[in-house]
Amino acid sequence: MATDTKNAAKECKAARAKDPDAFKTTWGTNVNKANAFGKCVSSKAKEAVEQQQEATLNAAQQCKADRAKDPDAFKTTWGTNVNKANAFGKCVSSKAKENGDSQND
C-alpha cells in the first residue's frame, strides 16, 4: 500500500500544480477546501488497492481453472519446492502481478 500511496501522491501533486483552484474545487470537502490533497491521495490510493485486489482475485480464478484442467501439469509448471505443493500460490502471485501490470497500462 505504501507504493500505492506514493503514486497517488504524485498524481495528486501534478493535478494540483496544473490547476490549483480546480483541484481544490474537485477534491476539497471542508469550508476552505484545505483538505483537497488528502482527499485526492486517499481516493486514488484506495482505487489502486482495489485494482490490485481485483487482479489477485482474477489470478486465483485463473489458477483454479488451470489446476482443474490438469493437476499434474499444473504442479510441474508452477511448483518450486520438493513436493510442488506451493504451485497454487506461485501461480496466483505471478498472474496477479501480470494482471496488475496490464491494468496499469
Image (spheres, rainbow, N blue to C red):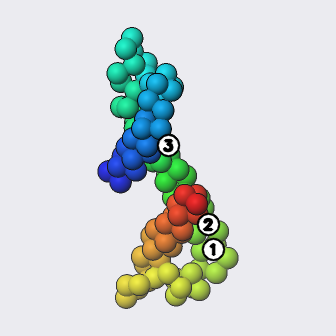
Type of amino acid under label 2: Gln
* Residue 66 position within the rendered picture, expressed as x and y whole percent measured from the top left: 63, 74
Q: Which residue is mark 3?
A: 47
Farthest residue, direction right: 69
User: Taking 49 as reference, is 98 above or below it?
Assistant: below
Residue matched to label 1: 66
Above or below, 55 relative to 64:
above
In the displayed structure, would residue 32 be above or below residue 59? above
Looking at the picture, tell me which residue is in the foreground, 8 or 64.
Answer: 8
Is 20 displayed left or right of 3 in the figure? Answer: right
Which secondary structure, mark 2?
helix
Q: Residues within 10 Å of mark 3 (few under 14, many from 20)?
A: some
Q: CA distance from mark 3 to mark 2?
A: 23 Å
Residue beneath disc 2: 62
Across and down, in percent, residue 9 comes to 37, 43
Mark 3 or mark 1, which has the lower sequence index? 3
Residue 82, located in which quarter of the rendered image?
A: bottom left
Q: Residue at x 46, y 25 (%)?
A: 21
